[in-house]
Amino acid sequence: MSGKDGVMEEEELKPQPNWHAMNREEVFAELELPEDHRLKGLTAEEAAARLEKYGRNMLSGKAKKTLLMKIWEQVANVLVGILLFVAAISLVRVFTNDPVTNGIQVGIIVGVIVINTAIGIIQEGSAEKAAEALKAMLSADAIVVRDGTETKVPADEIVPGDVVALSLGDRVPADLRMIEVVQLACAEAALTGESVPIDKTVDKIESDEPKSVPLGDRHNMCFSATLVAQGSGIGLIVATGDYTEIGTINQLVNKVEDKKTAVLEQIDNVSKWLAFFIVITAIVTFLVSFFTTDEAERDWLESLSVALVCAVAMIPEGLEAIVTVTYAWAVSNMAEQNAIIRALPAVETLGSVTTICSDKTGTLTKNEMSLVAWVTSNARYKVDTDSTERSNKNFARDDTYMAERADHTKMMKTRDLLKAGPGVSTHDRFGKKEQDFPYTMRGSVIDRNLASDHGKKATEAATKDESGEPDNFPVGAGESPELSFFRQGLAGGVLCSKCTLGKDGGREGEIGNPTELSILRASYWGGVEVNEMKDASPIIAEVPFSSEYKFMATVHNPTAENDGEGKDDKLIIHVKGAPDRMIPLCNKQFKAGMLNETEDVDRDYWIEQIAVLSSHGLRCLALLRGEIDKSAVNEGDQLGPEFVQDKGEWLTIVGVCAIMDPPRPECVDAVSEANGAGVRVAMITGDHKDTALAIGCMLGLVDEKHSSAITGPELDAMGDEEIKGAVQKYNVFARASPQNKIRIVKALQSQGEVCGMTGDGVNDAPALKAADMGVAMGKEGTDVAREASKMILADDNFATIVVAVREGRVVWDNLRKVLLVNTPINNAQGMSVLFGLVCGLPDTPLTAIQVLYCNLICAVTLGFVTAVEPAEDGIMNVPPRRVGKRLIGRYLFLRIALGTVTLVACTVGSTFWARSLYMDGATEEDDHYKDTVLPLMRSQASNTLTFGACAVTMSARFSYNSAFGMRSFYGNKFAWYSLAIVAVLQVAITYIPGLNSVIFGMGPMHAEQWGIAAMFSFVVFCVMELEKGVRRSLLAKGADVGDSEYGFFDEEPTPDQDITLPKGASHLNLTTLNN
């Protein structure tokens, strides 16, 4: 199933049969197995032969890049090529002219290349870890039948055709077609998105299109790497290794092709244009230097050296480093707010995200089935599922809480609503029966016409007393009853259960069905001592739960605390079950949920409550009580369902538990804030349509524009163009498979959307890789999802994404500011050399080492100032950056050009000014010029250019606001630190003997020269501020001065990109994806 040494082979995996659509005999025939194979299993020889045929049960990997390949990827660009050429020429001149200066120049250039290459390799993503995380999820051993005996074998040695035994707590070792089950259920949330364990059956699934049956609906299959949550079973291995469903995901993760983010692509484009401009400028400089020299003194190597000085000056050696610093600073800020970035360039992608596709279970919801409401005959109590303190205050009366039907169901009849609710078994779903919620309703109450149109009236009547006033018994609105009220009311949920509560009421160590555990957990946090309660009232006899009759009943001796006084001659029966099965067996209801008084059961009331709760995506579980004579049951009796069903209407209903996997409370605000920032949020889940739609309504995802939901099978039936329309019409996608998730992401991308995808499960990994920005959960998420993502939420808080989006927008703004600072400085260095020669200077105003020094120091210090500039006001009040927008738009280009021209004019002008001050009638051939004047001229040029660059930086900190005023003195302390560092270094290279003359070719400046440098720096600052004033004026008139509209050089997205998933990547017909 995998290549040699676990390395992925290129050949296409063969399609697999539709095992779920076959009966037992067809499966045996397809695998060439005898009829008695269940008892005998494979022989050792047959197992060895099949191992040779199918390969080991392990996931294949992908070939890793060698170090040389990684180095080549970093250095294979034009600018590095120019630097290497300059280094080669300098190396030649080491042996012909000025070995010290040229040697230092060679060392600096090589050092710059090495540092940038190292940074690139270190920051390169480690996508191969995702595959390793997948492999870690696989089972280590398996119990199989070999030669007629059950035996434990290493999981990588099992083969298709092996008979596997599963029991509680086992990790499924391969994909199995179940042939025997005993109350078997598997936790598949990480793979399918189902929030509760899936009940397993053995019958074939009837479907006209077997391939379209979602994984979550293939209830006769157990999938590799999932966990057995209850029961036991026997299965036949039908797929191992890469042919399993988790193997499919492994193939997708391995075959994803990394692509550069918008910024890195644009940095590459900027580099190419710069390279072109640099070459042209260097050629012109060479020609000017060569032909302006007397013919007798012309030296092509000297002129080439001058041209290369110009080239070196204009190459942004520090640009890549400062871009990395920009990313790293943002990453640091985000980490402090629980958003961990795995690949630095992914930060800027966040700023352009237009749609966030979020998984539901564990991302928008808690991934924890919780009791959210307790409904009695006259009231409903809201449960605080977020409380961290044990108190009866966690239950507060709130008769308005989910008291009306959800908006999308208000026009439905009660009968239709109950038939469509989340607690209803859907027999027509590929033949599946009650797969995820054990206590589902079949509609028996509905069929008996117990549901009437008077449910709402019944509800209103039940919540008022005889005078028509609100019924405040036992407590009024907002108040919490005594602990005994919930201890007795929820006793049926606690005692009629074999679940084990987790440590301190948490998830650690809990055992059992999540639905039942939700009642235990709510009771514990309400102050009930759950374990003591169970110990004090053990089960005498029971009717075990079965999916056939949908209830569980237990028999207990009475206790005063749980059941009241005077019941010593009775046995207490606790029944917990599907409301539709239980209500017909009731003749009484406990008044207000109190055990001391009963009244006739109001069936219309209870049916309406169930309908209302179901409309909000809640699952309903009825708790009932009964009493029998103590002699009617003996301890240890094996009771059947007739014990409950054959007594007629004899039970008393206590109340109804409303259970769901609730939305995270902070997610509602986060979705609203995202929408305010122009970012759409969509929910993609493997859960049922009705539950998904209800959660979507709670989160604010369902509105007039996106008023409904769509399912994975419905998407499967659509063509490409229909899917492109559907992804814009719906915000809620239910029953989604991994293929659906990827196609949704690709369809959004084809519409020009920048798509984020959040998730926590294995099934999310392919879509996380395919999305522009994959976001995984850090706490509840799987290692697979984390390794496939670009960002991890350490607190699993969806709201953290909004913080990350804001930081991403800051990164984009700051990168533009970095370019506004670095590009004019680089251009001015080279252009100053050229125009100095054009204007008549016999020597270059800047040496090569001055240029390299200024280039790196200004980039690292001044570039850092704008790289860490805080967000400007209103950054989250504007739409996301348009797809295809270039970093350098027309206005930024004009600003860069203005900065370049101003710096060049000031630098060359100051050089001529210094020359005029100190020539004293000497000529260029005199020693006075070479030893005194030229070093002073170069000192003047260096300091004017460097402090002029400081002026550009201080102005560039604010895109529109004026830098004149107090705002320049606060908000970014690093601005003043950087200015201080630059000033100290400039003074050092200007005055330290030897360093100034031997290394930099400079002389100690006079006082008047500092005045010249200060004056020209102020001129530069004023020019840049004047330009901002003009832009503010244009902005007030409605002009696009922020380059938000598409310009001539921008690339608008192509809306008709191919979103099909051709065969090749896996047996699920997925394909290699661009990341």
Image (cartoon, rainbow, N blue to C red):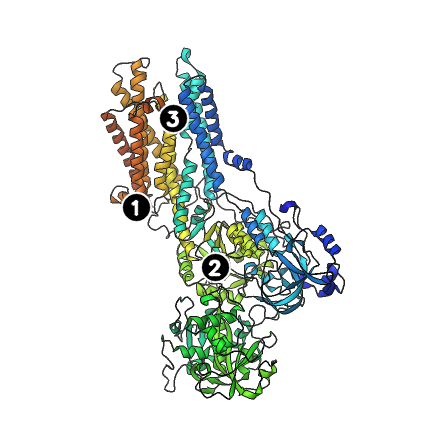
Query: Three-letter amino acid code at disc 2?
Result: Thr
One can see residue 208 in this view: no
CA gap between label 1 and label 3 equals 34 Å
Provide residue 519's location: percent of width, then percent of height. Answer: 48, 72
Residue farthest along the top direction in this orientation: 296
| Cβ atoms under marks 3 and 2 closer than 8 Å | no
Dot 1 corresponds to which residue? 971
Proximity of marks 2 and 1: CB atoms separated by less than 8 Å? no
Placement of 1007 over or under 137, stated as above or below? above
Whole-percent x, y for residue 1047 in the image: 43, 42
- Looking at the picture, how far across and down is residue 639, in whole percent? 60, 81
Provide the residue designation for mark 3.
849
Crowding at dot 2, Cα within 10 Å, few <14 / some 14-19 / many 20+, comes out as: many
Of mark 1 and mark 3, the one earlier in the sequence is 3
Disc 1 on helix, strand or loop?
loop
Spatial CA distance of label 3 from label 2 is 54 Å
Find numbered disc 2 in the image and state the secondary structure of the residue it sits on. Answer: helix
Residue positioned 45% across, 64% down in the render: 663
Residue kind at label 1, given as amino acid type:
Gly
Quadrant position of residue 994:
top left
Between 917 and 284, the one lying in front of the other is 917
- The Cα atoms of the two marked residues, 2 and 1, are separated by 34 Å
Q: Is residue 676 left or right of residue 41?
A: left
In the image, what residue occupies the spot 51% across and 81% down?
Answer: 624
Q: Mark 2 points at which residue?
A: 363
Q: Which of 954 and 797 is in front in this view?
A: 797
Give residue 352's mark: none
Q: 941 or 38, which is in the foreground?
A: 38
Q: Is 639 drawn above or below residue 1067 in the view shown?
A: below
| Disc 1 residue crowd, few under 14, some 14–19, many 20+, Cα 10 Å | few
Residue at (49, 80) in percent of width and height: 606
First reached walking from the N terminus: tag 2 or tag 1: 2
